[in-house]
Image (tube, grey):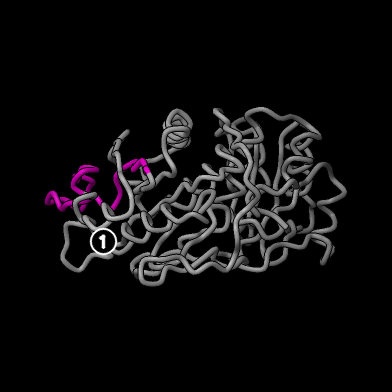
Amino acid sequence: MKKILMIATGGTIASKNNGEGFTPALTSQELLACVPEIAEFCRVTTVQPFNLDSTNLCPAHWLELERIIEENYAAYDGFVLTHGTDTMAYTAAALSYLVQHSPKPIVLTGSQKSAYLRDSDARRNLADAFAFCADDNAFGVHIVFDGNVILGTRAKKTRTRSFNAFSSVDYPNTAIMRDGKPFYYVRGQEKQEPTFYRALNDSVFVLKMIPGMRADIFDWLEKNCQGLIVESFGTGGLPDYGDSALLHGLERFLAAGKTVVFTTQVEREGSSLTTYEVGRKLLKCGRVLEAHCMTLESIAAKLMWLLAFAKGEDIEKLFYTPVGTDIF
């Protein structure tokens, strides 16, 4: 039987209503008791490093999860993390960079309704997560939710209430769960030793463009962040309201040695800075990186990972080097 370490972190799945709204309260053992049938195919040990609404999670928590996985990697065949849905895609992306090329599955799941409620989706998601984690062909970082098995670098929360909360953006599901077994669309990687990373630089800001954005925002950005992600319009570009002020602000930011990644606010099909003049201008003003089809969650996590140990041209080279099919 497979040995699986369950890492409980809180979230809706572990919540009870305390009179002021739902907040994490259930323990890892209480969650495990919801799926007694998993004892038929795996042995589970549980740990609970924290019990938080996932809105309150930050990069320091991602590093704690990496530490737990790395310290226990040799002793277990896989890992199931119960997690709140709001930032689950960010955590899945972060773990994809912190634990690379993992031949063992690292599976995140949660629910849209508390396991404490009768009509919850928690039991199914937990059962599917453990079933996938125990499968011989499972690998790498994935989210398992509502029967979908989604690669950690391609996942995005696209619904706030429905049970099918997560989508795989511009990439097929790795598998779907049918009667407790995965039906694969994408097969795993060649077996190799995982690479663990233990640092992130969270000095990253996301600037979502709106019509009329003022250029003096770059004065604040230059003082307060090392990496900038610009969510632009359409296929990508920077507005010019007749004075090129935004472009000059970007040039100053780049001249200060900062890193800029351009992406699109549009959920699917990615950016293409070479399509329009407003995009081509960006490619002439310094080392501007383009996210293409990457999710925002993966861009943010990858930039934090790169800024922790790389500089200059190495950042550019590594940003365009695929990790877990994050960019293509």
Q: Is residue 299 magenta?
A: no
Q: Which residues are magenta?
A: 3-30
Tag 1: amino acid? Arg
Q: Is residue 319 left or right of residue 267?
A: right
Depth check: 47 or 41 in front?
41
Quadrant of the drawing holding the C terminus: bottom right
Q: Is residue 27 magenta?
A: yes
Q: Quadrant of residue 64?
A: top left
Give the answer, above or below, for where 30 lies relative to 126: above
Q: Is residue 315 visible?
A: yes
Q: Residue at x 60, y 41 (%)?
A: 100
Q: Residue at x 74, y 42 (%)?
A: 249
Q: Residue at x 70, y 53 (%)?
A: 291
Coordinates of residue 90 in the picture (x, y in percent): 49, 48
Give the answer, above or below, for where 198 lies relative to 245: above
Q: Is residue 157 left or right of residue 202?
A: left
Q: Quadrant of residue 122?
A: bottom left
Give the answer, above or below, for where 120 lies relative to 3: below
Coordinates of residue 310 in the picture (x, y in percent): 71, 30
Coordinates of residue 159 in the picture (x, y in percent): 41, 67
Q: Is residue 142 left or right of residue 235?
A: left
Q: Is residue 217 visible?
A: no
Give the answer, above or below, for where 162 lies relative to 254: below
Q: Residue at x 37, y 43 (%)?
A: 3
Q: Is residue 69 left or right of residue 272?
A: left
* Residue furthest out toward the front: 1
Depth check: 39 or 62 in front?
39
* Residue furthest out toward the right: 284
Depth check: 253 or 61 in front?
61
The residue pinned by badge 1 equals 123
